[in-house]
Amino acid sequence: MRTLTRRTWTRSATATTVRPPKLFTPAFAALTLASLAYFTAVGMLIPALPRYVEGVLGGGNVAVGIVFGSFSVSAVLLRPMAGIFGDQRGRRPLMLCGAAVAAGSILLYGAAPTWTVLAIIRLVSGAGEALFFVGMATTFTDLAPPERRGEAMSLASLALYLGIGIGPVIAEVTMAVAGFGTVWALSAAITLLTVGLVLRVPETRVAPDGTGASGTLARRRWVHPAGLLPGLVLFASIVGMAGFLAFVPLHVLDIGMGGSGVVLAVFASVVVAIRSIGARLPDVLGPGRAIRIALILSATGLTVIATWQAPSGLVLGAVVLGVGIALLTPSVFAMAVADVPASERSQVMATTSAFIDVAFGAGPLVMGVIAAAYGRPTVFIAGAVIACGGWLLMTARHVGRTPAVAVSPAEAT
């Protein structure tokens, strides 16, 4: 009886492994393409805006920083409202409105007479990004089976990284051939293409009347408790990455390299490889374990960069850091929504993702102060220490929630 039961249980487990719940549906494909289009348009602004602010509007380094930073200010402030709206009114309206607002604001860039006015217009772009991102991320989790949410978020973030990688190339060519005005127009057009793709994605909110699965109205939370720990962990990793991206272009000169292009390309390639070929790793490892591993890898990579001050050390550190970053973000978002009702997912996503804006907004500024006071290698050490802090938070959570050892039906027999 014992042998027969165990064999039956094993066969059932094997069947489940062979036939995982379906993830790749037409709606999932349309959402992925919409994300790719949107972040390609955003990526086009990365090389164009600094040159426009400095060359056309006559701004300096401070002006460039303010124009970029204003985007994050409105994004982080609007995310809580976006989360509440997404849970009570729908995810798709968030994406449609966000993409439309972003497209309209980009078209106005060329009309700004000063960099101050452009910074104000960028506040509108940030609002559009907040709406689109919260709706997009929540819809990805809605469309994915629970056991494949990590894979879904890996592919979602892969679309983001590919878009940010493709967009600058398009912008560089466009600027050289047709100027800044055409860059703004093309970026806005690609953003509007996002609207068309989102129209092919069904609404995924639990019920059209704003009620959750239990039939009660979704609670309004400006800061959702379930998003705080994932957000803090996300912040702990992204601050180090922000410092890496901001100071590697200068660090390479300190160690005798001619430029940072190779290092950044290696870093990006590792992230893309892990999030495509290894998209299921967060689900296979489990979000909690994957996050702990990712934070240790991030801290290790940053420490190698800081202490092994040679080209080989920088490349090795970038590879290790890239693996950590690639594992972390999808796992964090999968963990964030794991134990919350579907009627509150947008609010959780809003709280969690707000820490990205905080990390990219405040991180480089703080790291700049550290670099000025203690030298550039200390920036990477500081990022490693903060990542270790995130690991301690996750380890404390794991110890506090360790369940009793489960006994399978076969063993019980």
Image (cartoon, grey):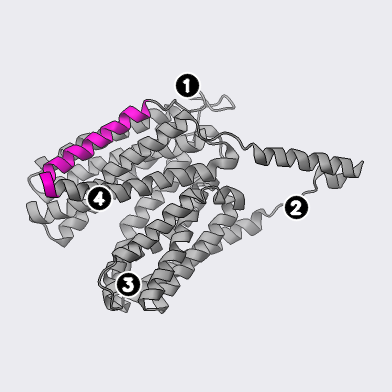
- At label 1, the amino acid type is Pro
Label 2 and label 4: CA atoms lie apart by 51 Å
Graded by Cα atoms within 10 Å as few (under 14), some (14 to 19) or many (20 or more), the crowding at tag 2 reads: few
Q: Are marks 3 and 2 in contact (CB under 8 Å)?
A: no
Residue 227 image label: none
Residue 208 image label: 1
- At label 3, the amino acid type is Ile
Q: Quadrant of the image for the C terminus?
A: top right
| Residue 48 belongs to the span the image colors magenta | no
- At label 2, the amino acid type is Ala
Label 2 and label 1: CA atoms lie apart by 39 Å
Residue 229 placement (x, y as % from top left): 51, 52
Magenta highlight range: 176-199
Q: Is label 2 or label 4 in front?
A: 4
Which residue is tagged 2?
404
Residue 311 placement (x, y as % from top left): 35, 75
Graded by Cα atoms within 10 Å as few (under 14), some (14 to 19) or many (20 or more), the crowding at tag 1 reads: few
Residue lying at 75% horizontally and 38% vertically, measured from the top left: 12
- At label 4, the amino acid type is Pro
